[in-house]
Image (cartoon, helix red, strand yellow):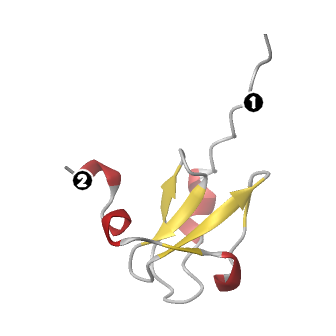
Amino acid sequence: MTETAQPAPIDPKLLELLVCPLTKGPLRYDSAAQELVSEKAGLAYPIRDGIPIMLVDEARKLGEAERVPPELRR
């Protein structure tokens, strides 16, 4: 049986320093999707090999339902 490597969590201190490059607003870490989410910009920045890719051109646009944090979704 093969084991799948779990992605390393992002350093909380790094998350405090990072902001959305478009809005300069805060980011939310989505560990399941390995993304940093900017609800204000409606974008999700990927994390690849533990490195946040903070380029607007690389970000995924969020759907309406995704703009609400998971803990507040019904």
Circle 2 SS class:
loop
Instruction: From the viewer's side, name the closer residue of 16 and 51.
Output: 51
Give residue 64's position: percent from left, percent from top.
Answer: 33, 72
Q: Residue at x 49, y 67 (%)?
A: 37
**Label 1: how many Cα within 10 Å (few below 14, some 14–19, many 20+):** few
Residue for point 51% across, 56% down: 29
Left or right of 62? Residue 35 is right
Amino acid at the residue labelled 2: Arg
The amino acid beneath tag 1 is Ala
Q: Position of residue 58 (x, y in %)?
A: 70, 76
Q: Residue furthest left?
A: 74
Mark carried by residue 73: 2
Q: Is residue 38 above or below residue 11?
A: below
The residue under the point 48% across, 89% down is 23
- Tell me the CA gap for discs 1 and 2: 28 Å
Marking on residue 18: none
Q: Quadrant of residue 35?
A: bottom right
User: Which residue position is annotated with label 1?
Assistant: 5
Nearer-N-terminus badge (1/2): 1
Q: Mark 2, residues whose alpha carbon is within 10 Å: few (<14), some, or many (≥20)?
A: few
Up the image or down, 36 lies above or below 5; here it is: below
Total labels drawn: 2
The quadrant where residue 21 appears: bottom right
Residue 39 placement (x, y as % from top left) = 39, 74
